[in-house]
Image (cartoon, rainbow, N blue to C red):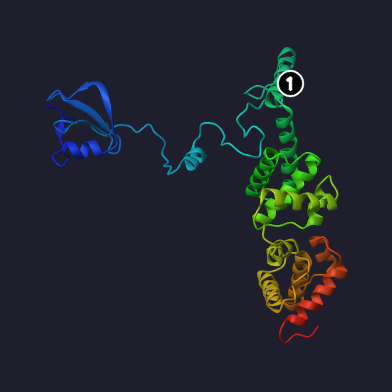
């Protein structure tokens, strides 16, 4: 009897069946000629009848990671790129590189370049089979461009893409431009994710007018029944403070000013961007940090007059301070 052929007295047939096992067809137990199964959890090949361990320390050829749901499994899998809503075909199609080079970085010959050009052309035609896919491809490209220009994270791009897909499926686009709807989706997604951008900032990177963006945004939110909360001025403070290179103390002071203003009702009917900009300016002065109304105006994309007006209102609402 070899060393590999030993029995495990503590394991019964019932316990063996409860473990993750699979039957090894073509193999039988050398002792009792019973059925042999592989216990993947313990890395052993065991006889289901007598409990003889035929082989131990087998190599686990599966992945080294574990997944507890299908989404986590897709994210961890290394077989191809994960699907994404930011591409019209969800990233499942083939992409042909625009550079005319082979896998070793060497330039292709003239005939190979012509062949690759034809392949790219036909690949593009197959990727967008109808007008709906062409519409979606153009819109998602606009969303990606605007999100990059605004410095928005990937989750906002994904949310904006999902909102646009819903608008397209529910036939909300007739009578409205692709750019207008895609811009409103970016605006809504940023607010839903808690990283809002002002309408002026959105209009600066869009190809449509501010009035059309606002009108389309209200229409999309109403028709799709999106739950978009009013923008909180405090959500703008970290970005403004970071752009102005202010300290954490100033940021916390600005948040305190805004909380006090909300308690006193000063924020009602006021632009959240204007309040946030004024709070950052006031906090910088109160903590003896150097900044100007012009610098805050440039960062917040709002006029200096608005900053001055909101600044006085915030100080008047603060206990013990005189404007």
Q: Is residue 18 left or right of residue 74?
A: left
Q: Quadrant of the N terminus?
A: top left
Task: Give whichever of 32, 288 is nearer the camera.
Answer: 32
Mark yes or no: residue 151 visible.
Answer: no
Task: Give whichever of 184, 237 is nearer the camera.
Answer: 184
Q: Secondary structure at mark 1?
A: helix
Picture quadrant of residue 64: top left
Is 242 rendered above or below residue 268?
Answer: above
Q: Residue at x 79, y 55 (%)?
A: 201
| Mark 1 residue crowding within 10 angstroms, few (<14) / some (14–19) / many (20+) | few
Residue 11, image x, y percentages: 17, 40
Residue 305, image x, y percentages: 88, 70
Residue 291, image x, y percentages: 80, 70
The residue labelled by disc 1 is 121
Is 255 rendered above or below residue 208?
Answer: below
Q: Is residue 32 left or right of residue 121?
A: left
Q: Quadrant of the C terminus?
A: bottom right
Q: Residue at x 65, y 21 (%)?
A: 102
Task: Give whichever of 20, 212 is nearer the camera.
Answer: 212
Q: Residue at x 73, y 12 (%)?
A: 111
Q: Is residue 104 left or right of residue 8?
A: right
Picture quadrant of residue 38: top left
Picture quadrant of residue 101: top right
Residue 265, image x, y percentages: 72, 76
């Amino acid at each position: 009897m070899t060393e590999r052929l030993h029995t495990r007295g503590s394991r019964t047939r019932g316990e063996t069946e409860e473990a993750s096992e699979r039957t090894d067809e073509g193999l039988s137990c050398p002792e009792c000629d019973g059925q042999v199964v592989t216990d993947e959890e313990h890395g052993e090949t065991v006889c289901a009848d007598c409990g003889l361990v035929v082989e131990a320390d087998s190599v686990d050829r599966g992945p080294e990671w574990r997944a507890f749901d299908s989404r986590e499994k897709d994210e961890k899998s290394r077989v191809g790129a994960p699907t994404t809503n930011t591409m019209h075909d969800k990233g499942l199609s083939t992409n042909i590189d625009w550079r005319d080079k082979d896998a070793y970085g060497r330039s292709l010959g003239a005939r190979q370049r012509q062949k690759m050009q034809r392949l790219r052309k036909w690949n593009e035609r197959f990727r967008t089979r109808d007008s709906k896919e062409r519409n979606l491809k153009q819109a998602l490209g606009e969303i990606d461009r605007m999100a990059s220009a605004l410095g928005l994270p990937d989750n906002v791009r994904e949310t904006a893409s999902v909102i646009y897909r819903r608008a397209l499926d529910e036939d909300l686009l007739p009578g409205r431009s692709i750019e207008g709807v895609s811009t409103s989706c970016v605006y809504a997604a940023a607010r839903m994710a808690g990283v809002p951008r002002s309408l002026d900032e959105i209009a600066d990177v869009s190809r449509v007018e501010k009035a059309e963006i606002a009108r389309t945004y209200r229409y999309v939110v109403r028709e799709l029944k999106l739950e978009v909360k009013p923008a909180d001025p405090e959500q703008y403070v970290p970005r403004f403070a970071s752009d102005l290179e202010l300290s954490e103390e100033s940021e916390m002071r600005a948040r305190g000013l805004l909380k006090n203003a909300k308690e006193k009702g000063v924020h009602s009917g006021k632009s959240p961007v204007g309040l946030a900009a004024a709070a950052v300016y006031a906090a910088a002065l109160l903590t003896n940090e150097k900044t100007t109304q012009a610098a805050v105006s440039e960062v917040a994309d709002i006029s200096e007059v608005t900053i001055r007006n909101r600044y006085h209102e915030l100080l008047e609402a603060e206990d013990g301070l005189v404007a």
